[in-house]
Amino acid sequence: MQVSVFMDVEDPINDLADDAARDVAEVFTKSGVRGSFCLTGEKCRTLLARGRQDVLDAYLPHCLGLHTNTHSYHPTTMELLADCNYEEGCQRALATETKGFDAFVAAFEKKPSFWGGAGNTWSCEIPWALSQLGIEAYSYALTATSETGVHKFNGCVALPQAISIGEDQWAAGYDLAETVLDYAAHFVGPWLGIFVGHPTRFRYQQFWDYGFANGVTPPTPQLADEQDEAVYQASLERLGSFLSDLKTQFKVVGVDEFLEQELAFREPTLQEREFFREQTAANLRSAKGWPIHRPDLDIENIVAKTLALEDTMRVLRTDS
Ligand SMILES: [Zn+2]
């Protein structure tokens, strides 16, 4: 089994977020683990504008993905794509993600290896747009063919997130990290994705985007409260211990290394099709509840557009 470890790097507002992004990347590098990091287009632009080449350099050894163009800025992915037909949605998705793609390439001089939804916000036009941009996979997949299975949907490889450790849990102690290691030891499948948080939430007590909740765009930046320095350092240390422990037990790879292998896909079974219809619809409806979304957001059109693409779904062969 192979394991990939994900983090999201997305805070363009708070002063210490850039340093935190660098600190966390260095924890991975020192542990000898290649992380899979999702960076927003806006984060790439602000790092470039602030001359933070040190932060960009810290990420170069790792697998890097695009985390939407502007994450929580309105309209989010679902807000943008809820009210249009599929063809119009494809053009909208391509237009916005091209901006993120260009910022990412300007920052790292290479294209993103994958794409991860912001707050899991997503619609079925995204994989079409990613194919146009030469990005072959999306993580945090809301599409599903089994509890944890890698699959293909609308031309892209879809990587589900099985398990996560939140920042407050890193701050509290190592217990959950041990639980996750135990979960991984009993996991059956070729690939497991583990999410371990956001550098900015290690450094601050709130998410950077709380001011964007309920569809609101704050007129001035709403800053977060700094985390206690000792708590921050302890969280980084625990993350480092987790990565070291993980590395001794599993083959930890970047998403790009997983994708480089000859992945073979097959037609889904009838049960997998049924699972897809039920679970994907449930996952989309759950993602609608992201606090950032406008309260009156209706995503049933996204559910319908997504389920209409059922025939594009393929399942990773595990016998090859
Ligand atoms: Zn995010």
Image: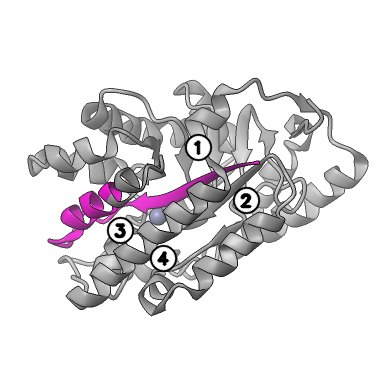
Seen at 70% across and 60% down, the residue is 282
Locate residue 106, reporting x and y percent: 22, 27
Amino acid bearing label 2: Leu
Is the C terminus in the top left, top right, bottom left or bottom right quadrant? Answer: top right
Q: Secondary structure at mark 4?
A: loop
Cα separation between marks 4 and 2: 18 Å
Do residues under tags 4 and 3 come within 8 Å of each other at their CB atoms? no
Q: Secondary structure at mark 3?
A: helix
Which residue bears the numbered disc 4?
A: 292
Q: Is residue 34 above or below residue 129?
A: below
Reply yes or no: does residue 7 show up in magenta: yes
Which residue bears the numbered disc 2?
A: 142
Amino acid bearing label 3: Pro
Cα separation between marks 1 and 3: 20 Å
The quarter of the image that holds ligand 1 is bottom left
Q: Is residue 195 left or right of residue 275?
A: left
Locate residue 111, reporting x and y percent: 36, 25
Depth check, front residue: 263 or 177 = 177
Task: Tell which circle, 1 or 4, labels the residue nearer the N-terminal end.
Answer: 1
Seen at 11% across and 42% down, the residue is 52
Q: Which residues are magenta?
A: 1-26
Cα separation between marks 4 and 3: 19 Å
Which residue bears the numbered disc 3?
A: 199
Q: Is residue 273 above or below residue 197?
A: above
Q: Secondary structure at mark 2?
A: loop
Numbered disc in front, either 2 or 1 = 1
Cα separation between marks 1 and 4: 31 Å
Amino acid bearing label 1: Val
Specify the label residue 253 is tagged with.
1
Numbered disc in front, either 3 or 2 = 3
Reply yes or no: does residue 319 show up in magenta: no
Seen at 21% across and 76% down, the residue is 230
